[in-house]
Image (spheres, helix red, strand yellow):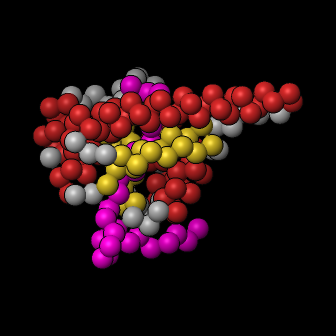
Amino acid sequence: MAYSRRRSYEPGHRPKFLVIIDETHECARAVRFAARRVARLGAKLVLLSVSEPPDGFEWLGVGDVMRAEAEEEAQERLEQAAEIAREAAGVQSELVIRMGAKTGEILKVIEEDEDISFLVLAAGTASEGPGPLVTSLAGKAASTYPVPVVIVPGGLSDEEIDAIAG
């Protein structure tokens, strides 16, 4: 798939760091890292939450209720992540909610916003591995992404993140 050219450093544009917000504990590590980098570089921060649409519940409006609940939960997660970014580096965040398959929606957001320069994820600390999102996006799919994928180790402390992110 051919992607549109990034415009992050052209006149009238600023680079953006895209962080995927989910219910995992390590997600806060990615937010802190990206917020610190954004503040240091004068860039912008985009927080994205993707919810899978409900399957097979279209009768009696149940699907609509489930979608509304998923959007409400996503909004709450985004607001919590935005607070982490404000506390960590004093940056404001652009909040984006999407419904659909996570990988596909992430690619759509990147394609729609030519200023997104980096995708920031946090690796899980569990013995099962870095987590499904990191595994899928940083594995064979990473070579097809139009921006670099930055993976923040989920076990880093605030002080360790601040020391490397600025």
Indicate the position of residue 121 as horizontal and vertical percent values: 39, 42
In the image, what residue occupies the spot 44% across and 27% down?
24
In which quarter of the view is residue 148 placed?
A: bottom left
In which quarter of the view is residue 59 placed?
A: top right
Q: Nearer the viewer, residue 71 or 51?
A: 71
Indicate the position of residue 11 as horizontal and vertical percent values: 30, 76
Residue found at the very far right of the displayed protein: 59
Compared to residue 97, the image places residue 75 above or below, namely above
Q: Nearer the viewer, residue 148 or 113?
A: 113
In the image, what residue occupies the spot 37% across and 34% down?
81
Tell me the chief SS of the magenta region: loop
Indicate the position of residue 139 as horizontal and vertical percent values: 47, 48
Whether residue 11 is in magenta: the answer is: yes
Q: Nearer the viewer, residue 143 or 21?
A: 21
Query: With 159 as the anchor, is 4 left or right in this view?
Result: right
Query: With 96 as the anchor, is 92 left or right in this view?
Result: left
Residue found at the very far bottom of the displayed protein: 11
What number of labels is visible?
Answer: 0
Q: Is residue 165 visible?
A: yes
Whether residue 38 is in magenta: the answer is: no
Q: Nearer the viewer, residue 142 or 34?
A: 34
Residue found at the very far top of the displayed protein: 127
Magenta segment boundaries in residue numbering: 1-25
In the image, what residue occupies the spot 59% across and 34% down?
71
Q: Is residue 129 visible?
A: no
Indicate the position of residue 44 as horizontal and vertical percent values: 32, 55
In the image, what residue occupies the spot 41% across and 34% down?
79
Q: Quadrant of the N terminus?
A: bottom right
In which quarter of the view is residue 63 placed?
A: top right
